[in-house]
Image (cartoon, helix red, strand yellow):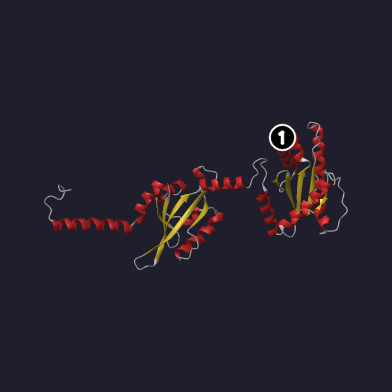
């Protein structure tokens, strides 16, 4: 350093330092996106600067990955042009709230509308964090923000959620997932029936053949239910040998008839397979989805308990046993391909 300043007076040294500092400050205040752009590229993010109407004035090089090259565009794109049509309004409202300093959230996530030229078919998700930019007179001149790819994070969240709502032994939904489906049906006012099915004498099976064989029986029963249910039905393993099915838009008498067909078919298949001379069977309880989730499941559980106590391989209506509904005449010889 002494060699550089040799021959320069102390007064001139101070002027040179002040000049360099002022120039650097002017460059940073005049175009902060230059520095931010370099930092963004290092982090894999995209810096975007818009005017007060949402048109993109400047952006870091990463914007080209979204099929937008500002240098070769006569008309600058709007920020909302980045989003798929279903997310345009969300993005527009978010930007307007940021400009007014009224946004209730720090960031939003949206699916990007990629041009066909990019060759990517799957949705790409980005998070956006915007901040208002002010002029010298303290008026808002636009926004500056950071776009960050979050597709991998969203996919990880989806997988974690799927794992949390899936029974690991059978691959069916678990109890929380089933109750979520019932809750959604109740909120939307959708009617239907809840079916609880238990494998008869399951504990005796595990004691005789071991837990591994018990797991195989449950896995086979789960596959059987998967082939029997129809699109729109929700099938879950609640706990141990108990399974549940939600039949949306199904009248109670039809649900009873369908469930009895399932029970009879499972018993017949078990006989055909000759499982070590052990007859496999199941019992079921049916209830209308009404009141609360706990109440509906409680009525269906009452039906299961009565069916098992009556010898198994049968279906009972928990509503009728509970006195919630008058018994209605119904035929239990309906086909599994019933029209409902």
Left or right: 321 as drawn, with respect to 6: right
Q: Is residue 52 above or below residue 220?
A: below
| Above or below 89: residue 178 | above
Q: Position of residue 140 (x, y in %)?
A: 40, 65
Q: Residue at x 74, y 42 (%)?
A: 225
Q: Is residue 141 left or right of residue 107?
A: left
Tell me if residue 207 comes above or below residue 309 in the rendering: above
**How many tags in the picture?**
1
What's the residue at 73%, 48% (across, down)?
245
Residue most extreme to the front: 207
Snapshot quadrant of residue 290: bottom right
* Viewer-proximal residue among 198 and 226: 198
Residue toward you, 77 or 266? 266
Q: Would you call the spot at circle 1 few (<14 residues within 10 Å), some (14-19), or many (20 or more)?
A: few
Q: Can residue 336 be seen?
A: no
Question: Where residue 4 sits in the image (x, y, percent)?
Answer: 16, 48
The answer to whether residue 267 is visible is yes
Look at 78% across and 41% down and name the residue there.
201
Q: Observer-nearest residue: 52 or 94?
A: 94
Residue 24 image point, x, y percent? 27, 55
For image coordinates 67% across by 49% down, the residue present is 175
Q: Furthest residue to the left? A: 7
Residue occupied by mark 1: 210
Measuring from the top left, give residue 125's x and y in whole percent. Answer: 52, 49
User: What SS does tag 1 mark?
Assistant: loop
């Amino acid at each position: 350093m002494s060699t550089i300043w040799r021959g320069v007076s102390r007064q001139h040294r101070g002027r040179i330092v002040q000049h360099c500092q002022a120039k650097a400050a002017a460059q940073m205040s005049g175009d902060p996106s230059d520095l931010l752009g370099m930092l963004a590229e290092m982090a894999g993010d995209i810096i975007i600067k818009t005017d007060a109407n949402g048109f993109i004035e400047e952006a870091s090089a990463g914007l080209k990955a979204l099929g937008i090259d500002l240098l070769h565009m006569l008309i600058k794109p709007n920020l909302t042009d980045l989003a798929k049509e279903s997310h345009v309004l969300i993005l527009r409202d978010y930007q307007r709230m940021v400009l007014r300093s009224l946004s209730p959230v720090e960031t939003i996530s949206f699916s990007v509308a990629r041009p066909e030229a990019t060759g990517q078919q799957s949705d790409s998700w980005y998070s956006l964090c915007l901040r208002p930019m002010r002029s010298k007179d303290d008026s808002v001149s636009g926004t500056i923000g950071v776009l960050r790819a979050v597709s991998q994070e969203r996919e990880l969240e989806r997988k974690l959620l799927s794992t949390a709502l899936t029974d690991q032994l059978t691959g069916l939904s678990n109890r929380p997932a089933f109750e979520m489906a019932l809750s959604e049906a109740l909120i939307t006012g959708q009617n239907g029936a809840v079916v609880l099915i238990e494998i008869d004498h399951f504990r005796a099976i595990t004691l005789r053949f071991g837990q591994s064989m018990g797991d195989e029986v449950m896995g086979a029963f789960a596959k059987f239910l998967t082939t029997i249910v129809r699109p729109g039905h929700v099938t879950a393993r609640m706990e141990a040998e108990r399974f549940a099915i939600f039949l949306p838009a199904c009248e109670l008498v039809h649900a009873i008839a369908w469930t009895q067909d399932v029970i009879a078919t499972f018993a017949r298949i078990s006989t055909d397979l000759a499982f070590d001379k052990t007859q496999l069977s199941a019992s079921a309880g049916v209830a209308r989805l009404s009141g609360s989730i706990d109440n509906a499941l409680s009525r269906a559980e009452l039906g299961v308990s009565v069916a098992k106590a009556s010898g198994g391989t049968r279906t009972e209506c928990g509503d009728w046993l509970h006195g919630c509904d008058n018994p209605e005449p119904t035929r239990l010889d309906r086909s599994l391909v019933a029209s409902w």
